[in-house]
Structures are given as structure tokens and as C-alpha cells.
Image (cartoon, rainbow, N blue to C red):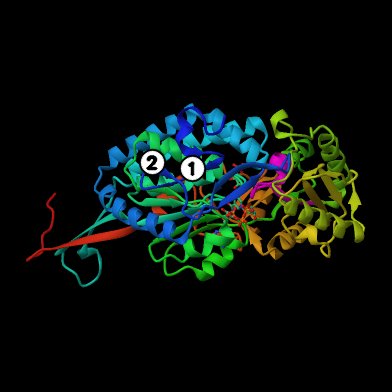
Amino acid sequence: MAGNGVFVDIIEGDVFKYYSEGEWKKSASGKSVAIINPTTRKTQYKVQACTQEEVNKVMEVAKAAQKSWAKTPLWKRAELLHKAAAILKEHKAPIAECLVKEIAKPAKDAVTEVVRSGDLVSYTAEEGVRILGEGKFLVSDSFPGNERTKYCLTSKIPLGVILAIPPFNYPVNLAVSKIAPALIAGNSLVLKPPTQGAVACLHMVHCFHLAGFPKGLISCVTGKGSEIGDFLTMHPGVHCISFTGGDTGVAISKKAGMIPLQMELGGKDACIVLEDADLDLAAGSIVKGGFSYSGQRCTAVKVVLVMESVADTLVEKVNAKVAKLTVGPPEDDCDITPVVSESSANFIEGLVMDAKQKNATFCQQYKREGNLIWPLLLDNVRPDMRIAWEEPFGPVLPVIRINSVEEGIHHCNASNFGLQGCVFTKDINKAILISDAMETGTVQINSAPARGPDHFPFQGIKDSGIGSQGITNSINMMTKVKTTVINLPTPSYTMG
Ligand SMILES: NC(=O)C1=CN([C@@H]2O[C@H](COP(=O)(O)OP(=O)(O)OC[C@H]3O[C@@H](n4cnc5c(N)ncnc54)[C@H](OP(=O)(O)O)[C@@H]3O)[C@@H](O)[C@H]2O)C=CC1
Ligand SMILES: O=C(O)[C@H](O)COP(=O)(O)O
């Protein structure tokens, strides 16, 4: 159970504590933030509403802790990360339980998220010792007009204090995908977890605490993003922001100072299905891609663009699979579970009603109970409908029928998002041409969009983000280049 066993220190009364200076603390605000269970719509947990003074304190200690952490040998940093990964995996059950209660993640997927997170931490430790253990050596005589009098040594050094802000949908995985690269690279880290998912994050942070990281190196401040978010992101003590979420990220990038930003934002991932596609494969991928975790994935298939000649067959196959999806509580491991909040369900319903008014074809009857929305495929969607462009982040998937590949590419590229896309065809040449033409960070050929495996590069263009993630890219992003130049009194050339 949450807050029990080795986790007993992280809670007092019914409010979970925040983590600062290597200790679990109550906020001086005396206030808490309620976390509403999406299934019961009742308060499940409470976390501290941290104050600005408490944020100032974690920034101060993070700065000091980073200085000595940067002097800790790389292999020792890796050793601690491996230890944290093992502890995290050992305690997957209580953490997964929080994910079920806070964000209605189906029970098995919740366990998978924790295990995947442990693996990510270990992989990052291994990758870090390799790529940070190497530098560059340049000599001056390769540039015109220079003798060989200068030797340039290049290495990667930490940025300082990293602020990590993950979203609700993968609170643990998208937190560790920021924490592990930051730490292996010699940075300290301040985590502001999403409110829904905060308690899972606090348990995860306690696993790092149990691993024995130095005091102040990792902190976790809780509170509503709308209340402490700006104070955190505009804090002068922050040297880099790694954020995953929605439009909030666009606002943050305008407010943040002159610091590196890693932004993973929304998406409207298009799935283009050509006439020669394996329609069974496409239908299976569309259902998995569109409806896993009730469509609440940045990488979910969010619009299907299918050639008119095969559209009827594809829609029929997709519908047959949608009919088999189970709908209900996350504890029962149902495929479709309640969406994260009432406001999210209302937003999704708004998109559905707009499509209804504009005569989209409803392949299933629209049904909603509380935050639970039954899976819905909308056929014959046209560009004047909101659902053609907006991200529902729910189990509703639009199908747009197209008459040419160009029409599909045009729709994909007209979106303000550019996260991922996918194309189904048996013609690899066509697939490559389409992939090159799609303005998205990644294109999957004959499979649905996906972030994982977590060491693959992952990036969005346009409003979908800044920079590239994935383990290696995140480590590099959380470092800066330092060079030392050795100036010789006379040219020196190496002999054969
Ligand atoms: N491209 C990618 O890799 C991914 C993108 N996403 C996108 O995330 C969205 C869903 O996640 P969701 O959690 O709703 O996204 P939000 O943008 O609403 O929230 C993300 C995080 O930002 C915090 N936050 C809110 N306001 C501020 C602020 N003013 N300053 C700083 N932080 C703030 C939130 O805290 P609080 O919860 O307390 O409000 C939360 O931790 C979707 O658009 C989805 O596509 C999701 C996963 C991956
Ligand atoms: O951000 C997300 O929505 C998830 O990281 C997606 O991860 P996945 O595509 O590997 O499920």
C-alpha cells in the first residue's frame, strides 16, 4: 500500500511530504493539494502545497550539492544509479498502485511503467559512463594557416541545477527520463511532479533516497503547477528546464531565461494507410496506437488518413477490434479506463459534439459515465471539424478519407504539431518518400508511433517541442562543452 513499509517516512497523517535536503518534510504553508482518483472522483491522496521559500531553499541546496557531485567519479555516480534502479524495480507494486489510483493507468501497464523506468535508469548509467568517459582531441594544423602548436581537449561538463517537470500520463517514466541523465552527467535535480501522479513520483524519489544519493542532490517540491510553476521555471537558480506536457510548455519557453530547454509537448500523430497496406496489421496498430491507456499518450495515433479505396475495409477491421476492448476500472486491468479528470472528459466530449454537429459518422454510440468514455471511432471526418486538428487525449479517434498520398501528407504537415507519424504500405520506396515528406520528429513504417525503446532518439518539431530526447540525447543535452587548449612554444608533429 502507498506510504507503507519502506515508504512510511514519506507520509504524515494523510498528507504526503515533500523532499528537500535529503529529508521528508511538511510544508510551512500548512496547505495541501488533493489528488482526485479519476475512477471514484473522490480525493485519493494529498500532497504538500510548497511555498516559494521552500522552492528557494531546494534551489540553494541543489546548487551546493551539485558542486560536490560533479567531483564524484563517473563510475560512482553510475553505481548509485544502478542501485536506485534495483530499488525502484523491487518496489514496483506500491508505486504501480499509486499510478492506478492517481491516473487510472491499467494495473499491468502501471507495473510495466515502473519496470521500464528502472531499466531506463540502468541503461542511462551504462550509457553515461561510455559517452561522458570520452572527449575529443583536436590539433591546430588542420585549419589553414596554422602550425601544429595547439592541442585542444574537449569534454562534457554538467550544466548545474536541472528542473524536471513531467506530465501526468507517465509520471514515473518521464520523471526518471530526466533525473537519470541529469545525475549521471553531474547535475543536481529539482523535480516538480504533475499533481495527478505526484504520489507515485514521491515513492520513486524515495527509491533514490534509499540508494544513498547525497543530501540536496535530488529534491521534489509538490504543489499545483498553476501556483508554483512560474516561480520554479523563472527561478534564477535553474540552469536547464526539461519539461514534458501540453501547451504550458510553449508558455514556459517564452518565460524562461537564457537557459537550455528540453520541451516534449503535444502531438497529433497521423497514420497514413495506403492502398497496398496490410490492413490487418494497420487495423491492429491503429487500435493499439489509438486506444492504449485510453489515448492518453503523446504518441497515440490521433488521426487516421486512409485511401478511400481501402477505407471501408479498414474501418470495418478497426471496428471489429474496438468492439473487443474492455471498458472499466484500472484495477480490473481494462483496456479503456477513466480519463484523468472531469475537465479532460468535458474537453473530449466537446470535440465529439462538434464532430456530431458537423455530421461525422459515429461507428459506435457515444457513451460516457463520469470520467469513463467508451472508445469511439469517427469516420468521414472533414478538416472543418475540431477533432481533425486538436489532440483529444482520450479514446476518440478520427478517420479522414483521402484520395491521394499528397492529400495525406498535406493534412499531416498542416498541423501545428510535428511529433510522430506512421505509414502503412508494402512498398518501402513509397514509405521512405512519405517519411521524408512528413514534418514530424519520427515516422514509423508499418507500426504505430511510440517513444520506446527509451534509448531511441525522440523529438517533436513545430509546437511538439524543442530538442531531442532519448537516453543518449538527454545526457548530451544536460551537459555543455568545455575545452582546454594547450599552446606549445614550437610546432610539434607526431612521427610515423
Ligand atoms: N511530447 C511528449 O513527449 C509528451 C507530451 N505530452 C503531452 O502532455 C499533455 C498531457 O499532460 P498534462 O500533464 O496534462 O500536461 P500539462 O502541460 O497540463 O502539465 C504538465 C506539467 O506541467 C505542470 N505545470 C502546469 N502549469 C505549469 C506552469 N505554469 N509552470 C510550470 N509547470 C506547470 C503540471 O503540473 P500540475 O499537474 O500540478 O498542473 C505538470 O507537471 C498532452 O498535451 C500530451 O501530448 C505527454 C507525454 C509526452
Ligand atoms: O509520452 C508518452 O506519451 C509516452 O512516453 C509514450 O511512450 P510509448 O510511446 O513508448 O508508450
Identify whether 138 is placed above or below 102. Answer: below
| Location of ligand 1 given as a quarter of the image | bottom right
Q: Amino acid at mark 2?
A: Glu
Instruction: Inspect the magenta stretch and tell me whether residue 75 lies in it.
Output: no
Label 2 near label 1: C-beta < 8 Å? yes
**In this rendering, would 433 be left or right of 189?**
right
Q: Nearer the viewer, residue 210 or 469?
A: 210
The image shows residue 190 at horizontal and vertical percentages of 43, 52
Q: Nearer the viewer, residue 431 or 123?
A: 123
Residue at 53% of width from left, 61% of height from top? Answer: 229
Residue at 33% of width from left, 35% of height from top? Answer: 79
Q: Which residues are magenta?
A: 289-305
Looking at this view, name the residue that lies furthest to the bottom: 145
Looking at this view, name the residue that lies furthest to the left: 489
Q: Which residue is mark 1?
A: 455
Q: Which residue is mark 2?
A: 127
The image shows residue 445 at horizontal and vertical percentages of 65, 45
Instruction: Inspect the magenta stretch and tell me whether residue 294 lies in it.
Output: yes
Q: Amino acid at mark 1?
A: His
